[in-house]
């Protein structure tokens, strides 16, 4: 049979995000795959060296469009560590609730992409609708649907508006009440099992060797989660479990996403019950003329796709000296994708790519 | 846990400096020749996740600084709570003229795209790397773009602002 | 009725069919893809305006360029735009294609998209709301009615300038010119 070179390119109905894979195929079987990132490269880390510490806040959330909140959190954590700023207690709880809502929204987006890829259009429409309800909550809290510049070094920008707690509880109850429908239509569906079982299988040893974190690793049986390993914000104040599965294929990864969403919703209810009163913001004197003392820091948090880290070097100036983001889609999209696509069939490319949850702007920055 | 690791490191390797600035971080500064041996030692000690391989351009000191950041996946033994919260930053300096380094893919296979990216953005050559082709950039630049002497605003002014708008012929 | 009125009356159904069924090509070019799935799914339904996403450029007549455009993406955008059949309309989405936006000093993004392909309308915002997209679609209908949405005609007539700008920004282009760019006049018969 003849060898062909195909482009699963940037303009493709199955590609979410601007990313491209070059495939060498023979018939229906892929011989070799090569990932081509770079369509969304803006040189973020270079641009951040030209702007002051405060001017970087609106920039930082645009690195990852699907879940901009974990980017704000990681930047605020790094600045607080370098400058020695304390965060009040209530702000930690508010940050945790905010990040868990973002996690629910991001997982619903991933569910839309995955269900659309497999052809389950009904479930995709439901997931996008429920994500829009979560975005309505964000709009009430911060003023913007997608980019909310809410986390600030020293706390969060404003407290919950009156009546917000009841709105959160009502929205999450209405989403949670649809879980039996989701289960019956998609997660317990025989077709989903046939399409995804055994596809893109990865063992625990391989996952650790290739640097995988997040649900790629938790689907192989290892309960590694930064929120338990190195707790930040208010994650060590409530009782919760890390969901895992055993098999390590696409089926297990999507089930881990579902379990994580349910766990996040329970965690938000528990956090809302035990939240203390107080201020949410420690005033930082004159942030426009900040000079952060010399030093370096590496902070990490758990975004919805895995371990998100930031290595920041400061020279004592009013601008950062070097900023480097360790994004979770980097090993997933560049190493693991190429290794898993060998000897797969063309129909499974989207399946593997979206179950690994590769988000293209994170790779290019 | 930190102190025992520090003693083991200082006993095994000569001329490295280990410092513990805070509870969850160890900083090691070493020469560029002994870095692979230190990495192998740390990997056997349980730090098996290369989280990040980064480079910093110290233009006043006339050198590049490569930083290896290692963390640990969970292990099932008694030292687990100490080791999990710890991350190790291993730094080494290489000269700015003709920067070279040996690849660490043999120890950590997931270093491959990090080295490719540093090669095209800083110009550091990694010997032994199987595929040093462009990853993110689309064209060649005279000075690699993340170095401190590349002025991005001047580049934009010279290239993009000089392209004229399209003159529409009135009919 | 005289001849001009008959022509206008015959063209009206064609325009109506054209504007009420704008098929948008599914190309996620930048940041703005995060507002496209809400727009095409059931909450902010775009199909009641006639806009649905299609798979290939050969079947599309609306190109929504969502977000900033990097140099590598510009190559893909020009190739996609040139494959679309006429009449075709482009809309720039977000504030980055207008004048560079937040990344005005980046070495890898282009600043004014208007210099490389013709644009019929802009939507400001970062990100624009779904309602802003629908207002833009209704404005595009008005422009189509008045024969002012003529980006593709401008491209055909000033192709030499567009091609020169594309070559200045991207270097060597791997595809031949879409319309003839010879230096002699077009009327020469060889």
Image (cartoon, coloured by chain):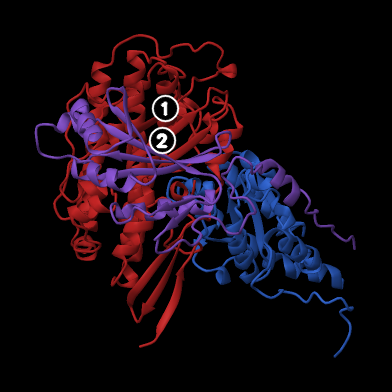
Chain colours: A red, B purple, C blue
Q: Taking A146 as reference, is B131 above or below it? A: below
Q: What x and y, as percent, mark residue A199? A: 23, 64
Which residue lies under the disc numbered 1? A78
Q: Nearer the viewer, residue B171 or A34?
A: A34
Q: Identify the residue shown where x is 80% and y is 57%.
A: B166
Q: Taking A297 as reference, is C151 above or below it? A: below
Q: Is A197 placed left or right of C55 in the picture?
A: left
Dot 1 surroundings within 10 Å: few (below 14), some, or many (20 or more)?
Answer: many
Q: Chain of mark 1?
A: A
Residue that sits furthest to the front in the current view:
B14
Which residue lies under the disc numbered 2? A310
Q: Earlier in the sequence, mark 2 or mark 1?
A: 1
Q: Chain of mark 2?
A: A
Is the C-beta separation of discs 2 and 1 under 8 Å?
Answer: yes
| Mark 2 to mark 1 CA distance (whole Å) | 7 Å
- Helix, strand or loop at label 1? It is helix
């Amino acid at each position: 049979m003849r060898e062909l070179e195909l482009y699963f390119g940037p303009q493709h109905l199955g590609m979410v995000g601007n990313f491209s894979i070059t495939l060498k195929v023979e018939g229906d079987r892929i011989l070799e795959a090569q990932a081509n990132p770079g369509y969304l490269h803006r040189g973020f880390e270079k641009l951040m060296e030209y702007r002051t510490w405060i001017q970087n806040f609106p920039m930082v959330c645009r690195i990852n469009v699907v879940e901009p909140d974990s980017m704000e959190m990681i930047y605020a954590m790094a600045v607080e560590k370098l400058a020695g700023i304390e965060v009040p207690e209530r702000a930690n709880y508010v940050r945790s609730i905010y990040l868990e809502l973002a996690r629910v929204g991001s997982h619903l987006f991933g569910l839309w992409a995955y269900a659309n890829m497999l052809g389950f259009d009904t479930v995709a429409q439901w997931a996008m609708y429920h994500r829009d309800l979560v975005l309505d909550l964000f709009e009430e809290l911060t003023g913007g649907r997608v980019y909310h510049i809410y986390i600030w070094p020293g706390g969060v920008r404003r407290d919950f508006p009156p009546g917000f707690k009841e709105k959160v509880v009502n929205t999450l109850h209405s989403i949670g009440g649809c879980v039996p429908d989701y289960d019956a239509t998609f997660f317990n569906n025989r077709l989903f099992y046939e399409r995804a079982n055994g596809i893109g299988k990865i063992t625990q040893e391989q996952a650790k060797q290739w640097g995988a974190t997040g649900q790629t690793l938790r689907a192989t049986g290892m309960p590694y989660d930064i929120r338990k390993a190195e707790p930040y914000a208010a994650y060590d104040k409530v009782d919760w479990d890390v969901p895992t599965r055993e098999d390590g294929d696409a089926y297990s990864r999507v089930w881990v996403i579902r379990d994580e969403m349910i766990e996040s919703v329970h965690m938000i209810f528990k956090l809302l019950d035990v939240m203390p009163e107080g201020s949410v913001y420690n005033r930082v004197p004159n942030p426009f003329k900040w000079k952060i003392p010399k030093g370096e820091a590496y902070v990490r948090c758990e975004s919805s796709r895995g371990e998100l880290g930031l290595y920041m070097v400061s020279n004592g100036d009013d601008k950062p000296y070097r900023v480097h983001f360790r994004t979770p889609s980097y090993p997933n999209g560049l190493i693991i994708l190429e290794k898993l696509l060998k000897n797969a069939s063309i129909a499974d490319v989207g399946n593997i790519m979206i179950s690994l949850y590769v988000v293209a702007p994170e790779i290019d920055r | 846990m930190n102190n025992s690791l520090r003693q083991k490191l200082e006993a095994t390797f000569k001329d490295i400096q280990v410092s513990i600035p805070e509870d969850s971080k160890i900083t090691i500064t070493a020469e560029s020749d002994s870095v692979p041996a230190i990495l192998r030692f740390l990997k056997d000690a349980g730090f098996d996740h290369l989280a990040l391989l980064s480079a910093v351009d110290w233009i006043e000191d006339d050198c590049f600084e490569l930083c290896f950041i290692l963390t640990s996946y969970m292990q099932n033994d008694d030292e687990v709570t100490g080791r999990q919260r710890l991350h190790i930053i291993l730094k080494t300096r290489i000269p700015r003229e003709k920067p070279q380094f040996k690849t660490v893919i043999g120890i950590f296979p997931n270093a491959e795209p990090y080295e490719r990216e540093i090669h095209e953005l800083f110009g550091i050559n990694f010997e032994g790397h199987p595929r040093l082709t462009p990853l993110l950039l689309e064209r060649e630049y005279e000075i690699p773009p993340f170095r401190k002497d590349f002025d991005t605003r001047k580049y934009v002014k010279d290239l993009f602002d000089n392209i004229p708008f399209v003159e529409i012929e009135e009919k | 009725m005289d001849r001009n009125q008959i022509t206008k009356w015959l063209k009206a159904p064609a325009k109506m069919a054209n504007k009420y069924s704008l098929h948008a090509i599914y190309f996620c070019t930048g940041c703005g893809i995060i507002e496209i799935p809400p727009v095409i799914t059931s909450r902010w339904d775009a199909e009641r305006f006639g806009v649905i996403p299609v798979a290939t450029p050969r079947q599309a007549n609306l190109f929504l360029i969502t977000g900033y455009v990097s140099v590598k993406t510009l190559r893909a955008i020009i190739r996609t735009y040139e494959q679309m059949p006429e009449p075709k309309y482009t809309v720039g989405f977000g504030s980055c294609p207008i004048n560079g936006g937040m990344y005005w000093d980046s070495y890898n993004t282009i600043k004014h998209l208007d210099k490389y392909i013709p644009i019929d309308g802009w939507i400001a915002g970062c990100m624009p709301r779904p309602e802003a997209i629908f207002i833009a679609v209704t404005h595009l209908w008005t422009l189509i009615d008045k024969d002012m949405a003529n980006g593709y005609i401008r491209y055909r007539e000033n192709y030499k300038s567009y091609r020169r700008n594309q070559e200045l920004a991207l270097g060597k282009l791997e595809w031949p010119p879409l319309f003839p760019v010879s230096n002699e006049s077009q009327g020469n018969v060889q």
